[in-house]
Image (tube, rainbow, N blue to C red):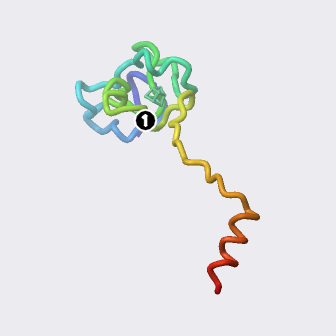
Amino acid sequence: MQCQTVLPGTECTFWGKQGCIFSEGSCQTIVENCEGCERIVEGSIGRVCSVYPAPAKKWSLGICNFATHVKVEIKTEELKINPLKASKKAAGKKK
Ligand code: SF4
């Protein structure tokens, strides 16, 4: 159903016949870590997140996985194999 308080007219799974069923009956405003995220929208209570109702809770678990301004760095070991040596090594094993 459509929200009628914080983001009027926006489809929201938390809005039901009794109103907002999210904890405390409302979305919560964004936190400092959200600054720069493209999902921030202006609501009737201030700036809120368009995809998650409790930004503080989201960040308490680590980096927000919906954030557009922060990327999770996955460090991968760069394989340093010389293709020529690798092919010689493989050829040597065939004996
Ligand atoms: S997607 Fe995450 S970082 Fe962006 S506004 Fe929402 S809670 Fe904040």
Q: Which SS class for mark 1?
A: loop
Q: Residue furthest bottom?
A: 95
Q: As drawn, is 69 to the left or to the right of 33?
A: right
Percent across and percent down for residue 89 are: 66, 71
Q: Residue at x 41, y 31 (%)?
A: 3
Counting the numbered discs, the total is: 1
User: As rendered, which of 61 and 50 lies closer to the eye?
Assistant: 61
Q: Quadrant of residue 83?
A: bottom right
User: As rendered, which of 87 and 76 lies closer to the eye?
Assistant: 87
Q: Amino acid at mark 1?
A: Gln
Residue 89 vertical position relative to residue 49 in the rendered view, above or below? below
Percent across and percent down for residue 21 are: 26, 34
Which quadrant: the C terminus? Answer: bottom right
Percent across and percent down for residue 22 are: 28, 32
Q: Which residue is mark 1?
A: 2
Residue 36 vertical position relative to residue 65 in the rendered view, above or below? above
Percent across and percent down for residue 37 are: 54, 24
Q: Residue furthest right?
A: 84
Which quadrant: the N terminus? Answer: top left
> 10 Å neighbourhood of mark 1: few (<14), some, or many (≥20)?
some
User: As rendered, which of 69 and 89 lies closer to the eye?
Assistant: 89
Q: Residue at x 71, y 58 (%)?
A: 82
Q: Quadrant of residue 93?
A: bottom right
Q: Residue at x 67, y 78 (%)?
A: 92
Q: Is mark 1 within 8 Å of ligand 1?
A: no
